[in-house]
Image (spheres, rainbow, N blue to C red):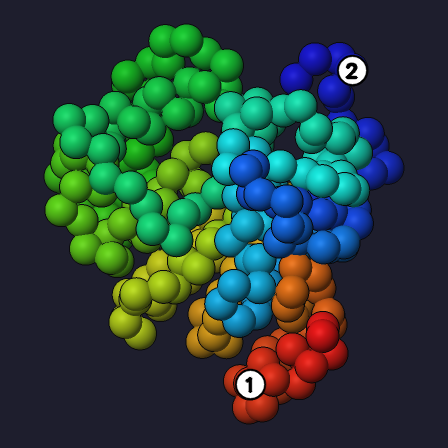
C-alpha cells in the first residue's frame, strides 16, 4: 500500500459502516445499512436464511465487479476501500474462500499459488523453492497429499478437496482478513471437521488475522468457537451475540428474526 494507505493505528482491523450495496445492473439494494466491526484476532460468524445477502456481503468486501456500493463504506485498518478493485484488496490482505470454487484447467495448484503469493507480496518472480517449501510445510500440517500440488486447480476435486485447497490458499497468502463463504457447504461431518481443524491451524499461525465465517448451521461453529455471532436478514444485521445465539437459531429457526427484519 502507498504511504497514504498505511494502517491507522487506532482503527479496527475491518469495518462495514452503514453499508448498502446493489447488483451492478440493478436498482434494488441487497445490503441495507449493514454494520459490523472486526478487531484483530476475532472470528465473527454470520448466519441467515438463503437470499438475505450473506454472499453479496462477502463479494462486496472482496470488490466483486458484480456489485456496487450505494451507501456507507468498507474500511480496512481505517482506510476506505472505495476505488480499490479485487486485486488491490487481495494485495492488502483480504482473502475470500468461495462457496463454489471454480476449476481452472491447465493451471496446477503449485503454479496458481506461486502467482498468488507473488501478487500478495508484490514480488514478480517469487522463488520456486520458497513456494515449494511453504507448500510442503502447510500441506503436511493440513494432511494434504503432496501430489495434490501438481493437480489442476479444483479440476476433478471432491467437495472436501476444494475446501481444503481454499484453506491451503488462506495459509500461504497470510491474509489480514479472511472471509469464508459457506465453507461447510456440501461437506459431510468428517470433511467438515478436517476443514475446521485447518482453519484453526491457520488462525493459530496468524493470531492477528480477523475472520468472517458465513454459514447456515451451527455445526461448523462448534469446531471454530466464534467470538461473535450475527443474525442477518434482509441485508442487515438484526441481532448479535455469542454462541448461545447460534444455539437459539438451531432450535427456533429463522422465523423470529425474519419477522423482526420485516
Does 5 sit above or below residue 89? Answer: above
Could one spot residue 128 in this view of the protein?
Answer: yes
The secondary structure type at the circle numbered 1 is loop
Q: In the drawing, what numbered circle is on residue 4?
A: 2
Of discs 2 and 1, which sits in the foreground? 1
Left or right for 137, reference 93? left
Q: Position of residue 202 (x, y in %)?
A: 47, 48
When asked about the image quadrant of residue 2, the answer is top right
Q: Residues within 10 Å of mark 2 (few under 14, many from 20)?
A: few
**Which quadrant: the C terminus?**
bottom right
Q: Position of residue 199 (x, y in %)?
A: 45, 54
The residue sitting at the right extreme is 10
Label total for image: 2
Look at mark 1 in the image and give the residue it sits on: 253
Residue visible at 29% across and 27% down? 112
Q: CA distance from mark 2 to mark 1?
A: 46 Å
Q: Position of residue 252 (x, y in %)?
A: 58, 90
The residue sitting at the bottom extreme is 251
Q: In the drawing, what numbered circle is on residue 115?
A: none
Of callouts 2 and 1, which one flags the residue occurring earlier in the amino acid sequence?
A: 2
Q: Position of residue 160 (x, y in %)?
A: 26, 58
Residue visible at 67% across and 23% down? 83
Residue visible at 32% across and 38% down? 137
Residue visible at 51% across and 53% down? 55
Amino acid at each position: 500500500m502507498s504511504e497514504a494507505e498505511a494502517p491507522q493505528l487506532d482503527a479496527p482491523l475491518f469495518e462495514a459502516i452503514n453499508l448498502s450495496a446493489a447488483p451492478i445492473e440493478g436498482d434494488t439494494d441487497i445490503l441495507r445499512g449493514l454494520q459490523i466491526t472486526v478487531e484483530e484476532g476475532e472470528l465473527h460468524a454470520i448466519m441467515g436464511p438463503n437470499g438475505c445477502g450473506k454472499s453479496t456481503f462477502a463479494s462486496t468486501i472482496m470488490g466483486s465487479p458484480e456489485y456496487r456500493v450505494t451507501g456507507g463504506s468498507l474500511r480496512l485498518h481505517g482506510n476506505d476501500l472505495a476505488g480499490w478493485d479485487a486485486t488491490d484488496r487481495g494485495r492488502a490482505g483480504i482473502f475470500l474462500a468461495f462457496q463454489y470454487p471454480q476449476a481452472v484447467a491447465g493451471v496446477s495448484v503449485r503454479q496458481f499459488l506461486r502467482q498468488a503469493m507473488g501478487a500478495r507480496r508484490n514480488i514478480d518472480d517469487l522463488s520456486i523453492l520458497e513456494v515449494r517449501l511453504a507448500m510442503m510445510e502447510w500441506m503436511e500440517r493440513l494432511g494434504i497429499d503432496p501430489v495434490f500440488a501438481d493437480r489442476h486447480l479444483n479440476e476433478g476435486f471432491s467437495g472436501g478437496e476444494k475446501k481444503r485447497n481454499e484453506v491451503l490458499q488462506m495459509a500461504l497468502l497470510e491474509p489480514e482478513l479472511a472471509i469464508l463463504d459457506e465453507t461447510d457447504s456440501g461437506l459431510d461431518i468428517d470433511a467438515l471437521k478436517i476443514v475446521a481443524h485447518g482453519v484453526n491451524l491457520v488462525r493459530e499461525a496468524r493470531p492477528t488475522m480477523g475472520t468472517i465465517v458465513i454459514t447456515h448451521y451451527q455445526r461448523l461453529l462448534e469446531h471454530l468457537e466464534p467470538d461473535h455471532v450475527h443474525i442477518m436478514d434482509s441485508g442487515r444485521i438484526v441481532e448479535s451475540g455469542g454462541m448461545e445465539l447460534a444455539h437459539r437459531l438451531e432450535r427456533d429457526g429463522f422465523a423470529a428474526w425474519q419477522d423482526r427484519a420485516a
